[in-house]
């Protein structure tokens, strides 16, 4: 029965493909409709079973893109244990992406960026709030909303410079004396994070 269904479905898909030569729209831009040809073919071979739902059945439409660029960027900054910023409207955010420092303004092109240890600064008029983030991701949407998720973050003014220097020295020593790949990896992460914090404080 399943083989027969596969043949019927493949024929209907091939026929539909041959009739259309225009470029397909994005799946999230298509109306939420059911393929009647597919449903009819399914019912012929499996009348007692509901047709399966495809991934597009569960996809939400893309957020509408404003006709003009907004004057503010809406920022959501979330940690595993807290929400630092929720729906905050700012002028600009600078994030430490793995590809380099990335300035995000209202109307920024939709992007997903991986974060590396470094400073994230939130600009609101003349007020600038700086955070040190360890890692994470930034999701920049077409509607000028930025969702920033960090594994760990702390306001820059809360970092103790002496503790950073002490930690950097300890991890540098551990890296030099590491005997296994795991010990080397853990020490290398510690060195990179503390080096980034030290650069942030000295800069």
Image: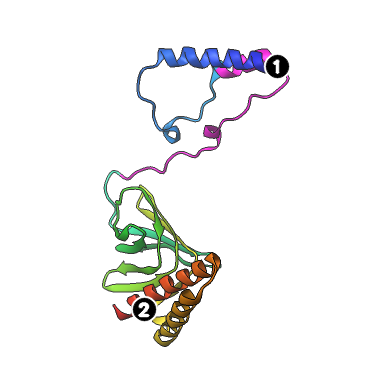
Q: Nearer the viewer, residue 57 or 184?
A: 184
The residue positioned farthest toward the bottom in the image shown: 162
Tag 2 near tag 1, CB within 8 Å: no
Q: Is label 2 or label 1 in front?
A: 2
Quarter of the image holding residue 85? bottom left
User: Can residue 62 be found in the magenta stretch?
Assistant: yes
What is the spatial separation of the Cα atoms under label 2 and label 1, in whole angstroms?
A: 68 Å
CA neighbours of label 2 inside 10 A, class few (<14), some (14 to 19), many (20+): many
Disc 2 is placed on an element classified as helix
Q: Which mark is residue 8?
A: none
Q: Can residue 60 be seen?
A: yes
32 and 130: which one is in front? 130
Residue 184 drawn at (x, y percent): 50, 69
- Taking the spot 33% from the left edge, 63% from the top edge, the residue there is 93
Image position of 29 with respect to 35: above or below: below
Query: Badge 1: how crowded within 10 Å, few (<14), some, or many (20+)?
Result: few
Q: Is residue 142 left or right of residue 183?
A: left
Q: Is residue 37 magenta?
A: no
Q: Residue 156 location in percent, x, y? A: 39, 77
Q: Would residue 39 appear left or right of 125 to someone viewing this image?
A: right
| Secondary-structure class at tag 1 | loop
Stretch in magenta: 38-66
Residue drawn 32% across and 45% down? 66
Q: Which residue is mark 2?
A: 198
Percent across and percent down for residue 108 are 30, 52
Q: Residue at x 34, y 75 (%)?
A: 200
Tell me: residue 152, above or below residue 39. below
Which quadrant, please, contains the N terminus? top right
In this figure, which residue is indicated by the disc labeled 1? Answer: 47
Whether residue 90 is visible: no
């Amino acid at each position: 029965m399943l083989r027969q269904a596969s043949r019927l479905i493949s024929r209907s898909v091939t026929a539909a493909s041959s009739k259309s030569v225009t470029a397909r729209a994005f799946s999230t831009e298509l109306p939420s409709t059911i393929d009647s040809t597919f449903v009819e073919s399914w019912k012929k071979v499996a009348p007692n079973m509901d047709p399966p739902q495809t991934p597009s059945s569960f996809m939400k439409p893309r957020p509408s893109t404003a006709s003009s660029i907004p004057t503010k960027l809406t920022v959501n900054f979330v940690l595993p244990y807290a929400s630092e910023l929720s729906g905050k409207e700012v002028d600009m955010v600078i994030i430490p992406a793995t590809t380099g420092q990335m300035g995000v303004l209202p109307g920024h092109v939709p992007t997903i960026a991986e974060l590396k240890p470094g400073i994230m600064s939130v600009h609101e008029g003349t007020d600038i709030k700086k955070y040190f983030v360890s890692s994470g991701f930034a999701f920049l949407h077409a509607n000028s909303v930025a969702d920033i998720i960090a594994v760990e973050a702390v306001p820059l003014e809360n970092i103790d410079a002496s503790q950073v220097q002490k930690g950097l020295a300890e991890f540098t020593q551990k890296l030099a004396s590491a005997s296994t790949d795991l010990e080397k990896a853990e020490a290398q992460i510690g060195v990179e994070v503390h080096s980034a914090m030290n650069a942030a404080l000295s800069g």
